[in-house]
């Protein structure tokens, strides 16, 4: 297994032109994370890059397996955030997906948002006001997208994901320091 994971060709499957191949790749990464996490941790740099930098997957065949891999990776590889540039590589892609209402895949993407943001370290969320403001504005913009407005299931998934994340953000910012108060006001008023 270590030999397989050390091969550059293996990691190129995350970008393969055939959706079924990409899906199988992400399913395999998820299985490795759940059952054989040692070798995945050895190849943490490649694992995190292949999975987290594909957070904007648009193919319905791949999206479910890709998000499962995202959640498995951020749970299994404790320092996964040190292997990718979240602010330049991951978050801009996530904001785009959210602004586009999940690109027709809201039923897959939005239920995964709460587990995802709950694993994002506080340092990456700093300043919290900017992070949560951008996050929720992107979701609201996505709710207004043509796809979301034309599909009750897409709209429902977006609203459910929004409400889950809103509750989480409020609970994480219940304190009385200035930054938490600003986040509270933004979440309630905006």
Image (spheres, helix red, strand yellow):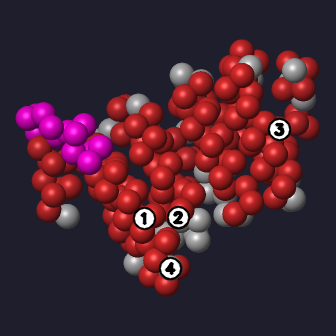
Whole-angstrom CA distance, mark 3 to mark 1, is 32 Å
Asked if the residues shown at circle 1 and circle 2 are in contact, with their CB atoms under 8 angstroms apart, the answer is yes
Q: Is residue 151 magenta?
A: no
Q: Secondary structure at mark 2?
A: helix
Tell me the residue that label 4 is attached to: 151
Whole-angstrom CA distance, mark 2 to mark 3, is 27 Å
Mark 3 vs mark 4, foreground winner is 4
Q: Please tell me which of labels 2 and 3 falls first in the chain.
A: 3
Whole-angstrom CA distance, mark 2 to mark 4, is 10 Å
Q: Secondary structure at mark 1?
A: helix
Tell me where residue 57 appears, x and y as whole percent.
66, 57
Label annotation for residue 106: 2
Question: Is 175 left or right of 16, judged from the image as shown?
Answer: left
Q: Residues within 10 Å of mark 4 (few under 14, many from 20)?
A: few
Front position in the image: 83 or 168:
168
Tell me the residue that label 3 is attached to: 11
Does residue 99 appear in this view?
A: no
Mark 3 vs mark 1, foreground winner is 1
Whole-angstrom CA distance, mark 3 to mark 4, is 36 Å
Q: Secondary structure at mark 3?
A: helix
Query: Which segment did they paint magenta?
Result: 167-180
Mark 2 vs mark 3, foreground winner is 2
Location of residue 174 by image quarter: top left
Location of residue 18 by image quarter: bottom right
Q: Please tell me which of labels 2 and 4 falls first in the chain.
A: 2
Tell me where residue 140 appears, x and y as whole percent.
35, 68
Asked if the residues shown at circle 3 and circle 1 are in contact, with their CB atoms under 8 angstroms apart, the answer is no
Against 48, residue 165 (above or below) is below
Q: Residues within 10 Å of mark 3 (few under 14, many from 20)?
A: some
At 36% from the left and 40% from the top, the residue drawn is 125
Q: Please tell me which of labels 3 and 4 falls first in the chain.
A: 3
Tell me the residue that label 1 is attached to: 158
């Amino acid at each position: 297994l270590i030999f397989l994971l050390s091969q550059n060709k293996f990691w190129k499957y995350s970008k393969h032109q055939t959706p079924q191949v990409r899906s199988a790749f992400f399913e395999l990464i998820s299985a490795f994370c759940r059952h054989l996490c040692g070798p995945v941790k050895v190849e943490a740099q490649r694992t995190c890059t292949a999975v987290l930098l594909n957070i904007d997957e648009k193919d319905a065949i791949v999206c479910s397996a890709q998000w499962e891999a995202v959640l498995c990776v951020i749970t299994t590889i404790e320092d996964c955030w040190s292997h990718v540039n979240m602010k330049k590589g991951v978050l801009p892609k996530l904001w785009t997906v959210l602004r586009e209402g999940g690109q027709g895949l809201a039923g897959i993407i939005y239920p995964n948002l709460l587990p995802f943001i709950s694993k994002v370290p506080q340092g990456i969320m700093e300043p919290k006001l900017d992070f949560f403001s951008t996050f929720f504005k992107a979701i609201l913009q996505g709710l207004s997208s043509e796809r979301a407005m034309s599909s009750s299931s897409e709209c429902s998934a977006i609203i459910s994901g929004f409400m889950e994340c809103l509750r989480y953000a409020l609970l994480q910012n219940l304190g009385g320091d200035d930054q938490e108060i600003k986040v509270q006001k933004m979440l309630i008023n905006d």
